[in-house]
Image (cartoon, rainbow, N blue to C red):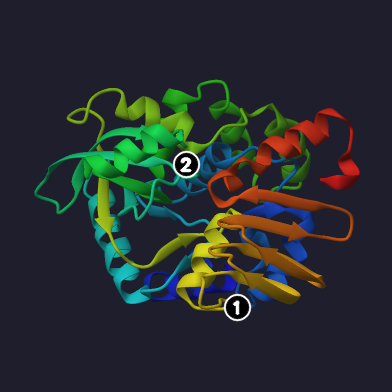
Amino acid sequence: MIQRTVDRLMPLAAPGDFWVITNDVLAGEICGQLENMRPEQVICEPVARNTAPAAGLAAFLIERRAPNAVLGMFPADHTIANEPEFLRVVAQAAAIAASGENMVVLGVTPTRAETGYGYIETGEAVPNGAVRVQRFTEKPNRERAEAFVTAGNYCWNSGVFVWSARTLANAVREHLPETAPHLEAIAKAWGTADFKRVFAELYPLCENISVDYAILEPRSAKGEHHSNLYCLPADFGWNDLGSWAALYEHQREARKNCDADDNVAESAGVLAIDAHGNYVYSPKKFVALVGVHDLVVVETEDAVLITTRDSAQDVGKIVKELAAEGRKDLI
């Protein structure tokens, strides 16, 4: 998926313009997968600190060299079905970002009341071809998600953001005043013999927070006419494979491992009787489904997960509970 993420953007940027922020566990594999990327373009976080410090670090690194350069933030766990349309929208977003201190997010028309995605409330259309952002809401409950979809002026937050290096760096300085100095110091040390030491010492001191919570939500609270936040609603076949439910939707739409009753099964065998809309992952065992609907069943070497597709985003609660009980062997 990271190969696809980079490949689809190649028409817009040279290989040397790509940066990957990851960790030491994945760095070697990523460098092997991305043959045109130099090792110094792969930044390895010493600890995980969510998207705000990661994106902020990229902004501070590039601000030192090309403050007006336009940056795009592209998660590598997304699928894009219509890549030409995606490139068109990204190019439009880059033009808007380059024209001032503007922040642009790519919006996706919602197809269901998904509780695992962020939502963007959109306002008036503006001459640059975008719409103003009125409000960001991160992962609403079921009732609010249904209200958003019914309202008709909400988009899913695709997680793809476009802004200039200076715009993002200044936003981090404004909204994360305790984290910004650490990121600036790390960026200043990049390329020196002290970089790894400075990175390891200062990055853990950064706030563990997403771009959405740290910057976009407080920025949108200023009011749509004062925030310089814009959304480009588009339909380019986007899917975030960050949950079992999203993976089910992706494979069902592709009719991959899918039967006539919309059961998707990656298993050693499956028999479904009066069963509809289930997702099964059980690579070593046969699974029988009788009279069940919209379930997620995941079997691994040491555990079994059973939930509904509607609740699949809540798997994180299980992870937190297991961590609290010291069951790291199951995480």
| Residue ID at (15%, 54%) | 129
Tell me the tag on residue 80. Answer: none
| Residue ID at (65%, 77%) | 35
Please tell me whether residue 223 is drawn above or below residue 27 in the rendered image.
Answer: above
Q: Is residue 15 left or right of residue 148?
A: right
State the residue in front, 181 or 204.
204
Tell me the tag on residue 257. Answer: 1
From where the camera sits, is residue 38 visible?
Answer: yes
Q: Secondary structure at mark 2?
A: loop
> How far is the residue under mark 1 from the one under mark 2?
25 Å
The tag earlier along the polypeptide, 1 or 2, is 2
Three-letter code, disc 2: Thr
Give the number of the mark in front: 1 or 2: 1
State the residue in front, 258 or 270.
270
Corner quadrant of residue 49: top right
Corner quadrant of residue 40: bottom right
Q: Is residue 287 left or right of residue 100?
A: right
Q: Position of residue 31 (x, y in %)?
A: 70, 69
Q: Position of residue 144 (x, y in %)?
A: 37, 33
Tell me the tag on residue 115. Answer: 2
